[in-house]
Image (spheres, rainbow, N blue to C red):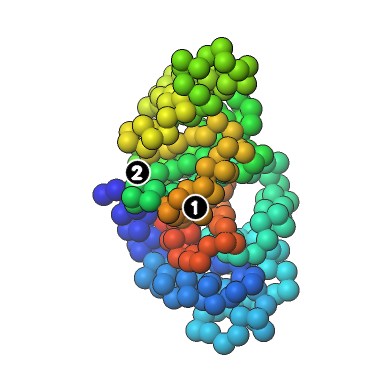
Amino acid sequence: MNIIDIIHSRAVSNHARIAIGVGDRPSRIIRSARASSAFADVVLVGSKSDIGTCDFEVVDTGEPHKTLVELLVDKEVDGVVRGNISSSTTLAELKQQFNLSRLHRVALLLTSDGVPFFFAPTGIDEANTIAGKLTLASSGCEFIRRFGITPVVAVLSGGRIEDVGRDAGVDRSLAEGEFVASCLRRGGVDAKHYTVLIEDAINHANFIIAPDGISGNLMYRTLVFLGGGDGFGAAVLMDRVFVDSSRAKEDYSKPIMLASSMAL
């Protein structure tokens, strides 16, 4: 089975209770919840007056970002998807309630040709140091192994090897990419530094690591919003199940599937 088959199979088997935040355009969330009925029991978290009449359980709240995280803390749900509520307030609440100094996330993406791969970092403030990149890469590999998948890592950097000497920033990026890949290999991970050649990396790796958080965020947005790709959201690497999703999405069934597949 490929990555998506494994995710779908686990989600169907778990059929977890997944809460999702509902902000504007609740009809998108309701359609997604209906599309997820085969692999999750979905709970809508938001203003009941805005959501209206529907055939799903609704947790009525004027502070969906806070209620969503509280449901996770109290273990009233198996997992959470951010849905289309505010990213900054929800992630801040998550960090506060779970006493997390920093969030690490790994996204599951699809190319326009339907090739699935894990990807990180996706946040502009993530993995912007060598230590942070190594921590994210190692934690991401552990996350991928939870699905019975062996991670094959491609570390990207800001140029080709023959570009050494053209720019100090490029030189530093290339050196960091080589160092991170070598550290991962010493830890027993199948990893290779692919320099800037993401088009080669996708043919061999199932976990691609961008040079830093800003470039990773841009790569994610370019693929999903401009390049005809798609995303299952970004799983926060923590003990409980939280899948971050973009407010710009039309369909949230894939993030719900990922969350259900992660539930224990």
Q: Is residue 217 above or below residue 81?
A: above
Viewer-closest of 175 and 20 = 175
Circle 1 residue: 226
Circle 2 residue: 148
Residues at marks 2 and 1 touching, judged by CB atoms closer than 8 Å: no
Viewer-closest of 73 and 96 = 96
Q: Which residue sits at x=60%, y=85%?
A: 52
Residue 148 can be seen in this image: yes
How far apart marks 2 and 1 lie (CA) works out to 31 Å
The image quadrant that residue 45 belongs to is bottom right
Q: Which quarter of the rendering shows the C terminus?
A: bottom left
User: At which x and y percent is residue 116?
Assistant: 37, 47
The image quadrant that residue 194 belongs to is top left
Viewer-closest of 12 and 118 = 118
Count of numbered badges drawn on the protein: 2
Q: Is residue 192 above or below residue 46?
A: above
User: At which x and y percent is residue 221?
Assistant: 54, 49
